Amino acid sequence: MKLTFSLFAVCVTLIIFSFTKPMQDESTYVNNYIKYSVERDGSSAKLTLDLVNIEQYDELYLRRSDNPTDNFRQVRYLKKNEIADLSREKIIVDKYPLPGNADAYYKLVAIDSKGIYKLFPCVKLSKY
């Protein structure tokens, strides 16, 4: 009886997990207005950015942390003229990322000409 119950429990668990969503890629964030992702590129980190109407922003800040919820520090600051270059290249490079033995989290903050802040969710740069 115990064996039958255990076998039934295992079957039910397998069936439930077969209907769950696959794990989301934490290195990429996508919505209707922005798509950005981060990856290691040798000794640097490369953030690829595709932002709808990027020209509307006066300032962009790229921030990094070892914690996904707090302690974000500024990595790059882009002014209006640098944002125009970014709209063509679509890449921001962090030349000095956190060491590869720990996860790092990157967050983008955008400020438009009216002074309105847009804070986008963080993406994860996984450890080696």
Image (cartoon, rainbow, N blue to C red):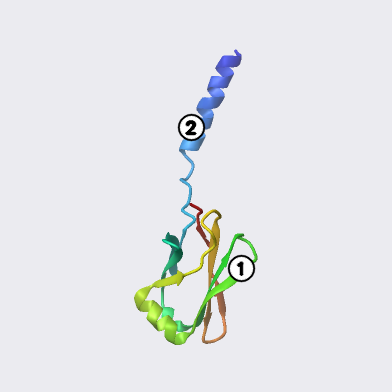
Q: On residue 72, which mark appears? A: 1
Callout 1: few (<14), some (14-19), or many (20+) C-alpha neighbours within 10 Å?
some
Q: Amino acid at mark 2?
A: Ile
Q: Which residue is mark 2?
A: 15
Q: Residue furthest left?
A: 88
Q: Nearer the viewer, residue 55 or 84?
A: 84
Quadrant housing residue 35? bottom left
> Where, by quadrant of the figure, is residue 68 drawn?
bottom right
- Identify which amino acid the numbered label 1 is placed on: Phe
Secondary structure found at label 2 = helix
Compared to residue 81, the image places residue 93 above or below, namely above
Is residue 122 visible from the viewing direction of this image?
no
Question: Does residue 96 lie above or below 15 as drawn?
Answer: below
Measuring from the top left, give residue 116's x and y in whole percent: 57, 81
Q: Residue at x 54, y 22 (%)?
A: 8
Count neighbours of disc 2 (C-alpha within 10 A) and say few if under 14, some if 14 to 19, many if 20 or more. Answer: few
Callouts 1 and 2 close, C-beta under 8 Å: no
Q: Position of residue 119 (x, y in %)?
A: 56, 71
Upstream in the sequence, badge 1 or badge 2? 2
